[in-house]
Amino acid sequence: LSYGFLLANQSIGIDDENIDFYYKYNGMVATGRWGSWLLYKIVNTYAYLPVWRESIAILVLIAAAILFVSLYEYVSETALDSFLSTSVICLMTSYPLVARMFVYIGGCVETAVCIFLATLSYYVYIFPFKNKYIKYAGVLALQILGLSLIETTAVYFCVEICVFGFANKKEKRWRALIFQPIGLLGLSIVCSKILGRLVAACLSGYGFGYSDYALSWFMRWNEIKSPSDYYTMLRIFLTNFKYYAQKYFSHKLFLAACAVWLMIVIFKVVKKEYTKALLALGVIVASFSLFIISANGYLPLRAYISNFIAVTGIALISFPFLMQWRYKGKWSGKYLVWILVFFALFYNTKEANEFYQIDYKRYLRDVDVARNVNYDLQKTLGKVKPDKAVVFLGVPEQYGDINTEDEVCLFTMYKDNETGGSIRIHRFFGMLGYEYPTVIGKPVDTYVDYGNFLKSEHIQEAIKNASDMPVYPEDGYIREFDEIIVIKLGVTN
């Protein structure tokens, strides 16, 4: 129900214009997501209304949730009744919808498919094939495909290994349940990166460049130079996670699930069931693995799209016990489970709805600035389109609810433009139909070296000439010079 707002009110975010740029001009290959690029080339989902794209993503999520619960029943040798199955599937499906990845263009279908592929690959792994090499090949194929869409497929699979391994009653099989799937996942990552480089190399033969850094899946380990850098990374992570845990119920729910998993670890160690303790601890570690793999403390909103598996795992473990609970022979544990599930779904729905409405308000505000600027530019020049390079400087003063700018995913398109790095603004204007020449002398649909771009003589000239100019929306914030047109949106550095 909360998703209805997004279906009816599509917006363009600061990552949307980037993803749109990547898809249209092959830049998605440079991020390591060559599978997404191929999918776009084969089936262009942007040619259809967003309601179909979002609906397909939700249906795939439901299918993944059903498969997940079925696998849990199989490995745990426990049959859940329809009430418990429905409760767990609803909880599992609602949690990813809160994730900010689903707001981005192209993020919803790919994320849903990756969750499904990660679960399906585990199903193929435990399915009794006559030829084990066919089974391994199937697992590799599914994981490579998932990794080529979004790299968090690896996180989904790792958390699932731990949850399913914990549920398995045949502890003698724990080595096969852990080491072989992890080995297959590692091989899948290597193969996916090699295939990605081959695709990028083929494209580069046609004049398209790519960066090795981007193909490393936004890892930042090359920036870690000293022990203090590790401390800085940890501090950023804790600060960001604390902020989101205080603000969002979904984060609180995840932390509560982690606390329960930790208690299970202690309980299993006391009972000397070390395999179970290891797997319970693995759920926590795997849920946070994206931060470790990427050495990036700025990922709490994106990373927790995998946390729902840890939450779902606790629900699957605890619900059967709660169902057996009785209070004075009248109150049944079934009512308690119903209340807990409804409460979780209600708050997840509330968060999703609030986020989408805030994002849409941000989008309307950005569009309002773009339309005003385009109108004033045409009035100033006396023609529809400028024939000189346009340089945007500064950030417009925020208006309305400034608290909506607290999160990276809600940053306005004009954010971080103090030094004139306005490529994003050019792309945003272009998506709205306002095409302006850039200082690089070519459209922004090509690979851009941001370092050299910011050193452009035109950028430096614009900063110098705009020192005495008023800022948007005051009269005179647009001025034409010999070779450039300067649009001063706000104060510059």
Image: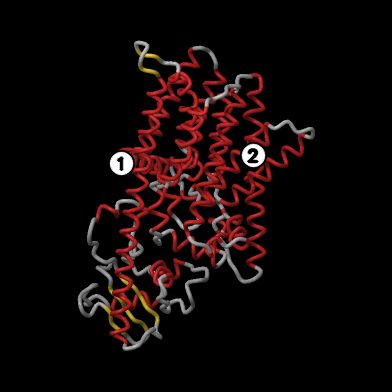
Q: Is residue 486 above or below residue 9?
A: below
Residues packed near mark 1 inside 10 Å, few (<14), some (14 to 19) or many (20 plus):
few
Q: Is residue 424 above or below residue 273?
A: below
Q: Residue at x 53, y 24 (%)?
A: 278
| In front of the other: 447 or 306 | 306
Q: Is residue 125 above or below residue 105?
A: above
Residue tagged 2: 121
- Element under disc 2: helix
Q: Is residue 31 above or below residue 288?
A: below
Residues packed near mark 2 inside 10 Å, few (<14), some (14 to 19) or many (20 plus):
many
Residue 319 left/right relative to 144: left
Residue 313: x percent and y percent?
49, 29
Residue 122: x percent and y percent?
63, 35
Residue 125: x percent and y percent?
68, 34
Q: Residue at x 41, y 78 (%)?
A: 436
Q: Which label's residue is closer to the chain start, 2 or 1? A: 2
Residue 9 left/right relative to 114: left
Residue tagged 1: 247
